[in-house]
Image (tube, rainbow, N blue to C red):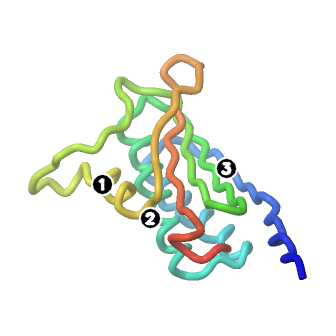
Amino acid sequence: MPQRPRPRIDERRFAFELPARTESVARARRLAEERLILWGCGADVRDTVVLVVSELVTNAVVHTASARFVCELREGEERLRISVRDEGGPAGPRIRDCGAEERGRGLILVDALCSAWGADRTGHGTAQVVWAELAHGMAEPC
């Protein structure tokens, strides 16, 4: 008997915009976690995504000249993608050797937790989107 194709997961998307201020980092974590709970994601996925959101949003707040940022969660059949669009800054994201410093480890964490990450210019001045992906093979689907 022929095997039936696996049902396709419709892509789910959630985006929000906040001011690029330090207090917005906690709000972004809460909004992401609340949405993942609504989507039925497990605690491990939620914890990982919330940490990645925190790191990407913190980078947009601390390292760009943005007044606002947009965070988006997008879950499809093969991956869950987290992206943060800022209004730009002097340099793109990079992993730094921070030695004993506590700051500067965000992208090292993102690199360790995610199957892929990167940054793309939006075409509007120095604005960019920094994104990270969790493959469903790395974590249970939501």
Indicate left or right for 10 with 115 as reference.
right
**Nearer-N-terminus badge (1/2):** 2
Q: What residue type is labelled 3?
A: Phe
Front residue of 77 and 104: 77
Q: Mark 1 points at which residue?
A: 108
Relative vertical location of residue 134 with respect to residue 83 in this rendering, above or below: below
Q: Name the residue under label 3.
A: 16
Residue drawn 51% across and 70% down?
A: 138
Residue drawn 64% across and 50% down?
A: 72
Q: What residue type is labelled 1?
A: Ile
Q: Mark 2 points at which residue?
A: 51
x and y percent of residue 43 in the render?
55, 82
Q: How many numbered marks does the figure carry?
A: 3
Q: Tell us which disc is closer to us: 2 or 3.
A: 2
Q: Tell us which disc is closer to us: 1 or 2.
A: 1
Front residue of 117 and 55: 117
Relative vertical location of residue 65 with respect to residue 72 in this rendering, above or below: above
Q: Which amino acid does label 2 sit on?
A: Leu
Element type at marker 1?
A: helix
Residue drawn 59% across and 54% down?
A: 81
Element type at marker 3?
A: strand
Residue drawn 53% across and 55% down?
A: 133
**Nearer-N-terminus badge (2/3):** 3
